[in-house]
Image (spheres, grey):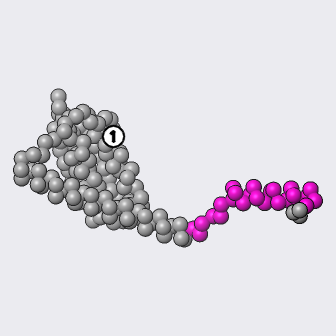
Amino acid sequence: MGLVLPPHLRERRRHLRHRGRHHRPTPDPPFTQLVTRSAEAGRRQLQRLVRLVDDLLDVSRISEGRLQPRLKEIDLVTLTREVVSRFELQATTVGCQLELTAPGPVVGRWDRLRLEQVVVNLVDNALKYGPGKPVRVRVESQGDRAVLRVTDAEIGTVELPLDP
């Protein structure tokens, strides 16, 4: 026969068991920050590697005449907003204020993947070569053109024609 506990101790045991299942110790903040920074650095390196492989494949496709754009209607503002949001942590890390200005939608027929590569490269370069300085991204239409400006210490502009 096992040990029989008085009711008040049984209740205490039940409480401790229940608390043990739901209680999670809080991780050490410096350790958590280190893990987060390391994971982010690994993610950025992986993205760079993927872009490098994609670029090499594109060069191969171009040389063989097999690179076909996949055009579809895209809002450049929405695409740029998505890209800029992915760079917020990197901007904070390098001390840059990352700002997007887009007065309204800018819709055209583009290859989403290629257009995203352009925006990613421009924002990445601005953050990389302008640490500590604000990086301003502006998307607007001017007549029948879409204008994407990524500005840090230097001015860079890419103009893309819109379909009428």
- Residue positioned 59% across, 69% down in the render: 28
Task: Give residue 132's position: percent from left, percent from top.
Answer: 36, 65
| Residue 118 placement (x, y as % from top left) | 22, 50
Instruction: Tell me the quadrant of the picture where the N terminus can be found.
Output: bottom right
Name the residue at 53% across, 66% down. Answer: 32
Residue 93, above or below 140: below
Magenta stretch: give its range. 4-29
Give the amino acid type for the residue marked by disc 1 in the picture. Answer: Thr
Residue sitting at 37 percent across and 52 percent down? Answer: 86
Q: Please state which of residues 4 and 109 is positioned toward the viewer in this rendering.
A: 4
Element under disc 1: helix
- Crowd tier of the residue under label 1, counting other residues whose Cα lies within 10 Å: few below 14, some 14–19, many 20 or above: some
- Please, what is the dominant secondary structure of the magenta stretch? helix
Judged from this view, the residue extending furthest toward the left is 64
Looking at the image, residue 84 sits to the left or right of residue 117; the answer is right
Q: Depth check: 95 or 39 in front? A: 39
Answer yes or no: is residue 144 visible.
yes
Provide the residue designation for mark 1: 78
Residue depicted at x 20% and y 41%: 111
Residue 109 among those drawn in magenta: no
Q: Is residue 7 magenta?
A: yes
